[in-house]
């Protein structure tokens, strides 16, 4: 490799990270000036997660991936699982060597093993493809393909991160607070009220027949108590009113009719009580099923999140080409569907810029909130302590230095074993083609990105030490600017030997 070409790779890597740094710094400055308050960050994050990113992923998968490509794209989820396993091993190695507090161990493993697989790679690859030709002379034509590949990669990550990862992080909170406090943290007041209502409903349905019988018994007792004085009065005054009984025949008939009506009402109530008693088991099962579905729904929503749903819908368009044609082919003649496709293309455009602005604003706000959060924890009587800085250094080394080297070793093993050549043959790509180099670069880059920033969201939900995790993320992302500026040229250089 000539010195000039090597310098071009270095220049591309440095310029890419400088672009990321500049846009991120704008978000940090705006947040520092109060132009992006907490509510604004929350709204921007909501739009990114539910609209902009799903639109980007859907359009990229639906338009850039062909049906034949599904025969080899299994390499993306396989790569994710390999990186995840290696990251978990490295996380436990950090724990074994540096002996951090027990209530940080799960967070350390997640910080090392789960990377930012979406926004950071998308920004870096978009910048490289648009501004240079180091991957392919027609790099701009590969942008949608790169976005589709990354969309497939992050689909599995989101599913595992919001299910298994969230469950695994609860062990830290359990070690710190114990099982009782952990349950009270995970279950909100609304959940407790709902649980109590289910218990009340279960007890009520189990005793409906008994309650109905009690009511009927009380009604009968009232009738008896009411009739007893009437009988006594009647016997006492029978001698004085015997001459008038013939005239009161109509009154006696009315009384008999009322008594018959009362008897019918009591019989109807008894029958209803019997039916309710027979239906009590069904009502109890129904209440339990309703409560179970209400508790499972949030977890299902986390697993099938908007980006994952976008990937599934995009793959549906790939499997059924007529749907893709109606959405993205203007010659299909279906004006309404084409307008929907164009709207989705319009929505995906602000994704990358908004993601970087939000990243900068979130990082600076988290750094500013560390003292307040720490004092709040101290006031609350929590036993959380800061993570020893040597352990944070171990996380940074494992995530930003060792993992990129593992990625290079993994791609090299694919090439030496012949599996890489077989994948390219399945894709009908030539070795060294732009598409092949792009796929290899994505596999390398996913090993080098920093920790997934959604880790702070999980910490907030579970009651973890979010102040300390915020500080971790700030330091890791600052260090990643340097590590990525180094590894991006190395990755681009390595592409010539794959």
Image (spheres, grey):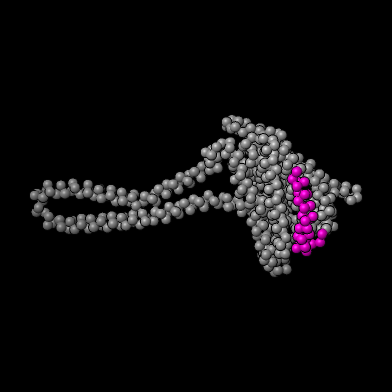
Q: Quadrant of residue 471?
A: top right
What's the magenta region?
402-431
Give the answer, above or below, for where 50 lies relative to 98. Answer: below
Q: Quadrant of the C terminus?
A: bottom right
Residue 355, percent from left and from top: 71, 47
Q: Residue at x 13, y 56 (%)?
A: 247
Residue 32 visible to the viewer: no
> Does 498 lie within the magenta span?
no
Q: Horizontally, is 259 left or right of 91 in the view?
A: left
Q: Residue at x 73, y 37 (%)?
A: 393
Q: Residue at x 63, y 43 (%)?
A: 457
> Does 429 lie within the magenta span?
yes
Give the answer, above or below, for where 418 lies relative to 45. Answer: below
Q: Nearer the viewer, residue 122 or 25?
A: 122
Residue 251, percent from left and from top: 18, 56
| Farthest front residue in view | 417
Residue 182 visible to the viewer: yes
Q: Nearer the viewer, residue 486 or 208?
A: 486
Q: Main secondary structure of the magenta part?
A: helix
Residue 304, percent from left and from top: 61, 54
Give the answer, above or below, for where 375 lies relative to 437. Answer: above
Q: Quadrant of residue 389?
A: top right
Residue 28, percent from left and from top: 73, 40
Q: Nearer the viewer, residue 23 or 438?
A: 438
Q: Residue at x 71, y 34 (%)?
A: 390
Q: How many marks?
A: 0
């Amino acid at each position: 490799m000539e010195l000039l070409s090597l310098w071009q790779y270095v220049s591309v890597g440095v310029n890419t990270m400088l672009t990321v740094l500049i846009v991120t710094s704008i978000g940090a400055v705006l947040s520092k000036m109060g132009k992006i308050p907490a509510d604004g960050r929350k709204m921007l994050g909501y739009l990114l997660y539910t609209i902009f990113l799903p639109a980007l992923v859907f359009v990229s998968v639906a338009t850039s991936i062909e049906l034949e490509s599904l025969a080899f794209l299994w390499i993306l989820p396989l790569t994710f699982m390999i990186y995840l396993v290696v990251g978990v091993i490295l996380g436990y190695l950090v724990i074994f060597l540096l002996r951090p507090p027990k209530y940080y161990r799960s967070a350390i493993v997640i910080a090392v093993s789960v990377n930012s697989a979406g926004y950071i790679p998308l920004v870096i690859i978009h910048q490289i493809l648009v501004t240079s030709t180091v991957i392919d002379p027609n790099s701009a034509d590969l942008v949608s393909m790169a976005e589709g590949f990354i969309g497939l990669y992050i689909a599995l990550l989101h599913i595992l991160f919001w299910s298994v990862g969230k469950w695994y992080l609860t062990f830290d909170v359990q070690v710190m607070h114990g099982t009782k406090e952990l349950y009270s943290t995970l279950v909100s007041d609304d959940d407790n009220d709902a649980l109590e209502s289910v218990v009340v409903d279960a007890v009520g349905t189990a005793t409906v027949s008994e309650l109905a019988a009690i009511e009927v018994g009380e009604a009968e007792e009232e009738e008896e108590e009411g009739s007893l004085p009437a009988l006594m009065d009647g016997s006492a005054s029978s001698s004085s009113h015997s001459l008038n009984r013939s005239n009161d025949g109509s009154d006696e008939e009315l009384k008999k009719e009322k008594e018959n009506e009362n008897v019918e009402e009591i019989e109807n109530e008894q029958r209803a009580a019997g039916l309710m008693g027979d239906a009590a088991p069904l009502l109890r099962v129904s209440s339990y099923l309703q409560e179970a579905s209400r508790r499972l729904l949030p977890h299902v929503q986390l697993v099938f999140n908007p980006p994952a749903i976008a990937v599934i819908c995009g793959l549906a368009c790939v499997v059924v080409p007529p749907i893709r044609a109606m959405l993205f082919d203007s010659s299909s003649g279906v004006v309404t569907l084409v307008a929907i496709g164009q709207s989705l293309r319009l929505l995906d455009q602000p994704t990358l810029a908004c993601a970087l602005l939000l990243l900068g604003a979130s990082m600076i706000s988290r750094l500013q909130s560390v003292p307040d959060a720490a004092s709040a924890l101290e006031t609350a009587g929590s036993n959380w302590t800061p993570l020893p800085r040597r352990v944070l250094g171990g996380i940074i080394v494992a995530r930003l230095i060792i993992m990129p080297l593992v990625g290079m070793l993994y791609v090299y093993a694919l090439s030496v074993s012949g599996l890489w050549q077989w994948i390219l043959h399945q894709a009908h790509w030539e070795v060294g083609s732009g598409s092949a180099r792009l796929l290899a670069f994505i596999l390398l880059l996913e090993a080098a990105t920093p920790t997934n920033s959604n880790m702070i969201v999980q910490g907030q939900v579970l009651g973890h030490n979010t102040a300390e995790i915020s500080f971790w993320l700030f330091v890791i992302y600052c260090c990643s600017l340097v590590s990525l500026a180094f590894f991006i040229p190395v990755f681009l250089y390595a592409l010539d030997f794959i």
